[in-house]
Amino acid sequence: MTGMDNFDFSLVNAGGDFVFILIVFLLFYFILNKVFLRLKKNEYLDLKKYLPVEEIQTLGQVFYLIIISACFIYILASLIDLSDNFFLSLFDFFLSTFCFLLMKKDSFRDKILLFLLIPFGSISFLINNVYTLLVLLNFIHLIGFVFVMKHYYQKFLEYTENNGLGIAILLLYAIVFISMIATHFTENVNLLDALVMSSNAFTSNGYAVLGSSIPGKINSIILVWSGYIISGVSTATLTAAILVKHYNKRFDELERLIKENLKD
């Protein structure tokens, strides 16, 4: 990382922080794992109760692409945009823990990848508001995210093929992210603002940035894309319901005519 304001490259401090940060991260991971397992068992979060199977399969594709996109955004922000170190470190902490939760933990290769996912530099900054020698591990940390992106892109392709889905959704993501990068450079705004502006423009909500704070802008992105997905679901569900009602009526009429002919 570059653009650092505070430095403390003491070897002693870095060594003590390494053990402490490892404990903090693993503790948070175990808590998140418990919460995740409880949520998986919650019947109210079963999407099959609310959405058609086809839409759930599409959301499965979206899930893989969101993880890939989040990793890509962090890598990009770490290399070219350090407008807010605190929120970037916080984003890294939650994203790394979530990826750590989802990745396999069986082979020695898996364990190496898991170690690369531990955000030593970001947690050190969040705790001390100072960069220590552990920030150097963030460069290796980026390699971990590259492998996560590769892993989930393969899972996306496998999931798409196994469920007989198309990959047109990749075009949507390519349009948004190319637009985000172009907006970042042409409008001279940070990546978060560029993503908000691109999302708003893509969903026909305008081009302005919505939200004056980072949490507000993140909320804006969530609202924009949630609304886009839900509107798509609602349209598809309504269309399906109308077609089913129409053809059920036709089948009832056909059944009535068959019964009348049999009587004659």
Image (cartoon, helix red, strand yellow):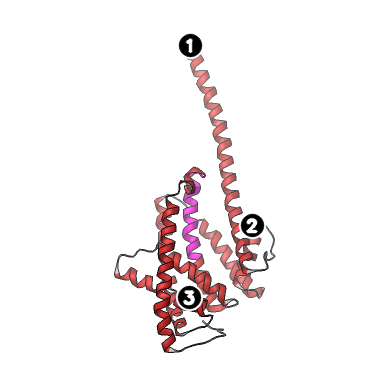
Q: Secondary structure at mark 1?
A: helix
Check disc 2 and report the residue beneath it. 203
**Foreground tag (2 vs 1):** 2
Q: Inspect the image, locate mark 3, and give the three-letter code of the amino acid beneath it.
A: Ile
Residue that mark 3 sits on: 123
Q: Which residues are magenta?
A: 50-69
Q: Disc 1 marks which residue?
A: 263
Mark 1 to mark 3 CA distance (whole Å) = 80 Å
Cβ atoms under marks 3 and 2 closer than 8 Å: no
Sequence order check: which comes first, mark 3 or mark 2?
Answer: 3
Numbered mark located on residue 20 in the image: none
Alpha carbon of mark 2 to alpha carbon of mark 1: how far?
Answer: 57 Å
The percent position of residue 191, horizontal first and vertical second, equals 60, 71
Eye-nearest disc, 3 or 2: 3
The amino acid type found where label 1 is placed reads Lys
Q: Between 155 and 41, which is closer to the camera in this rendering?
A: 41
Residue at (60% x, 49% y) in the render? 231
Nearer to me, 55 or 120? 120
Does residue 23 belong to the magenta stretch? no
Q: Quadrant of residue 151?
A: bottom left
Residue 226 in the image: state x and y as whole percent. Answer: 58, 55
| Label 2 with label 1: CB-CB less than 8 Å | no
Observer-nearest residue: 140 or 46? 46
Label 2 amino acid?
Answer: Thr
Examine the residues drawn in magenta and state their main secondary structure: helix
- Residue at coordinates 57% horizontally, 67% vertically from top-left? 178
